[in-house]
Image (tube, rainbow, N blue to C red):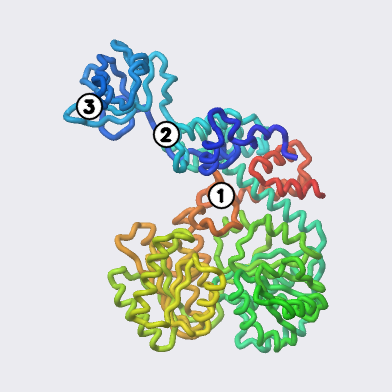
């Protein structure tokens, strides 16, 4: 149960004065549907009305506040659609206040002739005279509190005004209760941090641009609360997993020996290290949940296959889940000869399996005649029953979060879980998303892999690039051509890709294919399959993930408008070439002039092929929000914590969570009860439920 003290914060935003159904939809779009969402949305800007020049010294196009005397009103002549003007002055000159569609009675009451008034807004020169159109504020100098000197600015959406959003946030902050302190007093004192409510009040009351920084004490305090909630939730999930017994899976090595003898290369030291980690986990009585990270082409699939053989040696079964059907088929092809050498039955189950074929496969799976099953997420649908599933491997790009991992853990007899990703994740980010898992990294590439020659070329040399593609494909090789993606249904980019498709077809003939986000899955698969089989020489793609095809003949990757992509994306794309033994190249086409960040990105890419170095650099250059992008749904969404700048706080939160689990694993002390409130406050209640489930 959520603590009652938090109920006012988890109320719908319609409880706020002036927020009806229409406004609540807009505010929810900008921040979220509950009062707490507004409290945890920090200001993104500041309006400063503290600048108080004279009329003569007032600069144009800057918000300022003037103290003036109201001299006389000039209402427009009856029937004329002219503005209402009020002439004001100070000892240095005159100012005209201009109002369109104004009510005369209201203006005469607000700006009485002969009285002094504070007016705030922007000055402009019009016909040699100084004027202010529709002042933002008009106040009596005797009541300066009527006009705030500083106004925070919040994220908005179409149809939502800054004033309405600010009023809603102000009300939400006023509803913030005093909560029991969950931080250690010594820690707060050492950092000179205030209590939770004081920190929230300060975050929403900036007095200078510096107060908007993520590094101010109030922002750091709330960011640390958020990071501690994240790390404590992961620690609780990990504890719950360890508490629930898994099973010890120990092979005798006979199948492994056969498979390794059939490998055309030796395993790298990094692969051997990863295998040792995995085998140690599988032998332990607790359930394995491990993340295997490695660059494209580092040999993760072989590590996964050898791990699955260990499960088969122990008399059980294994499953490999791929994100798309075409990748599942590629896994089948690449592993078939090894499976045959080891003497194990390897099968695939996809949407193509219908009728009697599907029934027969499912029957063999249930009786244990299939040792290793490859497929998409359909492997975990109703009716797909294993005789004894001991290991599940989830492949690349199935970006799923902690909640999905918890859900998967409840399927069947708790099989061991190995999650693979070819997206190098910065260490700080992997702590926030995969802190409940063990980690292995494959940092070497198999011997014999040639580095990819990476070049940045301006768009003005496009004709040379097309000529190079013609030459390369004429020699029997293949090329990828990636057009930029801003969002999946981006009309402009789709048009650009189609135009590029048409122009390349004129030069290269019919051996050019196009995949984009608006095609159906089967349509995309059909084009990809033709490229993979070698029927197409060039594959043009608008989206990044569809290019996850292993085509050993692809030796050239062209990325158009490379300046629009993130470093990690560019690195991922580059990893699609250079997978065979031929020399490969990656051409980054850019439109000058380049900004400093774009220059730095392209330089990093030319200087290194180490995905982990690139990931850290990407985080430094772009910040966590941009690195993750919307697609990586497995990562937690932070409101005030910024992993790019709060790395030190994250490390402290991890240590603190560890200490809490050692001292108060059930969260039953006074601090423990307060920490339960913290978990609910930041919507990490899944972890509290694990506590109550024992």
- Residue at the farthest top position: 114
Is 654 left, or right, of 533 in this rendering? Answer: right
Residue of label 3: 130
556 on left or right of 25: left
**Disc on res. 208:** 2
**Labelled pair 3, 2 in contact (Cβ < 8 Å):** no
| First along the sequence among labels 3 and 1 | 3
**Quadrant that contains the N terminus:** top right
In primary-sequence order, the first of circles 2 and 1 is 2
For the point 21% across and 20% down, the residue is: 93
Which mark lies nearer to you, 3 or 1?
Answer: 3
270 to the left or right of 517 = right
Residue tagged by mark 1?
648
Pick out the residue farthest to the left: 128
Query: Residue at the spot x=27%, y=30% of the render?
Result: 123
Residue at horizontal 42 percent and vertical 79 percent from the top: 512
Task: Using the numbered discs, state the Cα–Cα distance from disc 3 to disc 2 in whole angstroms.
Answer: 28 Å
The spot of residue 331 in percent (x, y) is 62, 78
How many angstroms separate mark 2 from mark 1 (CA)?
25 Å
Q: Can residue 325 be seen in this view?
A: yes
């Amino acid at each position: 149960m959520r603590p009652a003290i938090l109920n006012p914060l988890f109320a719908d935003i319609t409880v706020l004065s002036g927020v009806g159904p229409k406004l609540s939809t807009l505010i929810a779009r900008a921040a979220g549907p509950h009062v707490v969402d507004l409290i945890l949305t920090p200001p993104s800007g500041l309006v400063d009305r503290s600048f108080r020049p004279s009329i003569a010294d007032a600069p144009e196009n800057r918000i300022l506040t003037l103290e003036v005397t109201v001299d006389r009103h000039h209402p427009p002549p009856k029937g004329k659609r002219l503005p209402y003007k009020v002439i004001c002055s100070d000892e240095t000159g005159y100012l005209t206040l201009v109002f369109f569609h104004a009510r005369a009675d209201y203006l005469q009451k607000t700006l009485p002739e002969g009285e002094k008034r504070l007016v705030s807004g922007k000055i402009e020169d019009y016909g040699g005279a100084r004027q202010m159109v529709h002042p933002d504020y008009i106040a009596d100098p005797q009541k300066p509190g009527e006009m705030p000197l500083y106004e925070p600015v919040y994220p908005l959406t179409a149809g939502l005004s800054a004033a309405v959003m600010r009023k809603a946030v102000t009300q939400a902050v006023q509803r913030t209760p005093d909560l029991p302190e969950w931080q250690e007093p010594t820690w707060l004192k050492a950092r000179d941090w205030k209590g939770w409510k004081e920190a929230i009040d300060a975050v929403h009351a900036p007095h200078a641009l510096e107060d908007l920084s993520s590094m101010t004490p109030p922002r750091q305090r709330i960011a640390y609360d958020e990071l501690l909630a994240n790390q404590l939730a992961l620690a609780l999930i990990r504890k719950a997993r360890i508490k629930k017994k898994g099973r010890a899976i120990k092979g005798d090595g006979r199948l492994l020996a056969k498979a390794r003898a059939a490998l055309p290369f030796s395993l790298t030291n990094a692969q051997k290290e990863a295998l040792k980690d995995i085998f140690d986990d599988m032998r332990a009585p607790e359930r394995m949940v491990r993340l295997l990270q490695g660059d494209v082409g580092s040999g993760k699939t072989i590590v996964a296959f050898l791990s699955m053989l260990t499960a088969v040696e122990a008399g059980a079964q294994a499953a490999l889940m791929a994100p798309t059907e075409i990748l599942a088929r590629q896994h089948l092809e690449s592993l078939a000869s090894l499976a045959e050498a080891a003497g194990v039955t390897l099968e695939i189950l996809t949407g193509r399996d219908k009728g009697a074929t599907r029934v027969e496969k499912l029957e063999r799976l249930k009786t244990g005649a299939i040792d290793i099953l490859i497929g998409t997420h359909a492997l975990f649908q109703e009716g797909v029953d294993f005789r004894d599933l001991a290991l599940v491997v989830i492949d690349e790009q199935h970006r799923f979060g902690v909640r999905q991992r918890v859900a998967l853990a409840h399927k069947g007899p708790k099989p061991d879980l190995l999650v693979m990703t070819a997206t190098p994740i910065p260490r700080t980010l992997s702590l926030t998303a995969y802190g409940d898992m063990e980690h292995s990294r494959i940092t070497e590439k198999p011997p014999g892999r040639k580095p990819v020659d990476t070049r940045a070329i301006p768009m003005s040399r496009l004709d040379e690039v097309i000529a190079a593609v013609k030459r390369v494909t004429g020699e029997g090789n293949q090329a990828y051509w990636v057009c930029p993606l801003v969002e999946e249904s981006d009309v402009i980019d789709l048009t650009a890709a189609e135009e590029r498709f048409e122009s390349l077809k004129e030069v290269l003939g019919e051996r050019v294919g196009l995949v984009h986000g608006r095609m159906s899955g089967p349509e995309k698969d059909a084009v990809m399959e033709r490229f993979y089989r070698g029927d197409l020489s060039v594959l043009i793609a608008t989206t990044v993930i569809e290019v996850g095809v292993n085509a050993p003949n692809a030796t050239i990757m062209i990325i158009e408008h490379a300046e629009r992509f993130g470093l990690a994306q560019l690195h991922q794309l580059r990893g699609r070439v250079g997978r065979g033994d031929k020399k490969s190249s990656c051409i980054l086409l850019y439109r000058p002039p380049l900004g400093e960040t774009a220059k730095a990105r392209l330089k990093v890419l030319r200087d290194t092929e180490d995905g982990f170095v690139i990931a850290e650099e990407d985080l430094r250059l772009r910040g966590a929000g941009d690195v993750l992008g919307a697609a990586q749904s497995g990562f937690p969404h932070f409101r005030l914590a910024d992993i790019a700048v709060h790395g030190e706080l994250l490390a402290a939160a991890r240590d603190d969570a560890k200490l809490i689990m050692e001292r108060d694993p059930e969260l039953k002390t006074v601090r423990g009860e307060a920490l339960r409130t913290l978990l609910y406050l930041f919507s990490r209640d899944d972890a509290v439920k694990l506590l109550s489930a024992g």
